[in-house]
Amino acid sequence: MKLALDTSAVPDQPAGAGRYVVELARRLPGRGLDTTLVTRKGDDARWREYSPQATVAPRVPSARVARLFYEATRLGTSDVARAADVWHGPHYTMPRRGTTPSVVTIHDMTFFTNPEWHERAKVAFFRRAITYAAVHARAIVSVSEYTARLIDELLEGHAPVVVAPLGVDLDRFTIEGADDERVLREHGLDTQVDYFLFVGTFEPRKGIDVLLDAFTTVATEHPLVELWLAGQHGWGVSEVEGRLATHPASARIRRLGFVPDGALAPLLRASRAAVYPSRGEGFGLPVLEALACGVPVVTSRDTVMEEVAGSCATLTAAGSATDLSRAMLELLSQSTLQRVQSAQRGRERAEQFTWARCVDQHLVAYHLARGE
């Protein structure tokens, strides 16, 4: 089967949905697919490094508006699309012209359910794109059962949905790490400090405001513990910036920015717990990566993160700083035995989510798109 995978929406520093596309690009050629990666012009070198077995086709304009216009009007009739048996749009969208059977990944439905979590222009665009893809794609990939249920509720007459939960690199995200202290020192990080770790893009739905409020209580009761925030800036961060500047324990809040792949697992393993108080996600990959490292996790109840973590995380009410601070304080009081037992349960849970199984489900979707 000849597959064209559109990687043109993946930023230079991939996280979340971007990481998902990178993992697909790495693994699909090894599953017997003749894979072509459709990239932005000038962005082909890194994709050749990510996936040496794939063909790379740098066809798409770099500027965002031009890229989306090109996708809608010309990409579907390009030589790459015409040569493919299946086109995969892994980020909600698909070409509007052309006859190649398409598969589209819908990560979440928050553009419909919680538009306040997104920039206004993106809400209008992605609502149209998702509605179009739902009925014009031959198959839809959902990264969770949670999102699949919402697709059924909110999109009438949609294409068949294949659920393909994301995976975790179980060789990299492990309970033990031989060189963690050295790696963290190279990034200027003190391994002797007790800290809670947040990993994620800075944007309103991530719950960083709630985390900062919760840390006020935690910092008062534990005068040495720190809060480390890892991730790129998204949008709508002015309120968070204000809270950071005036936080009573601001000297114990460290902003790490984007964390390279090689440092993420050591950073998780050295933490007291990973705290991910997001109000809603499509999957919540940081939760899974923390569980794979045997790290205690605090995340939000009644979200997809509960589906991912099962009974292996401490669940709190989304938006409740009181719940969150209570959970963080309880984790600080855990015994060594409790931490060891928690680590093993988390690891066993994470081992149920592999990229190989994720790819298996994508193959199902590709065959559905071909009518097989």
Image (spheres, rainbow, N blue to C red):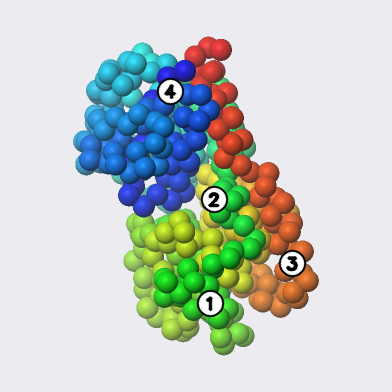
Q: Nearer the viewer, mark 1 or mark 2?
A: 1
Q: Is residue 85 above or below residue 283?
A: above
Q: Position of residue 215 (x, y in %)?
A: 54, 76
Q: CA distance from mark 4 to mark 3?
A: 44 Å
Q: Amino acid at mark 1?
A: Thr
Circle 3 SS class: helix
Marking on residue 191? 1
Q: CA distance from mark 3 to mark 1?
A: 19 Å
Q: CA distance from mark 3 to mark 2?
A: 22 Å
Q: Nearer the viewer, mark 3 or mark 2?
A: 3
Residue at 53% x, 28% y: name it: 31
Q: Which residue is mark 4?
A: 34
Q: CA distance from mark 1 to mark 2?
A: 24 Å
N-term mark: 1 or 4: 4
Q: Nearer the viewer, residue 80 or 9?
A: 80
Q: Which residue is mark 2?
A: 285
Q: Nearer the viewer, mark 4 or mark 3?
A: 4
Q: Position of residue 70 (x, y in %)?
A: 24, 29
Q: Amino acid at mark 3?
A: Val
N-term mark: 4 or 3: 4
Q: Which residue is mark 3?
A: 340
N-term mark: 3 or 2: 2
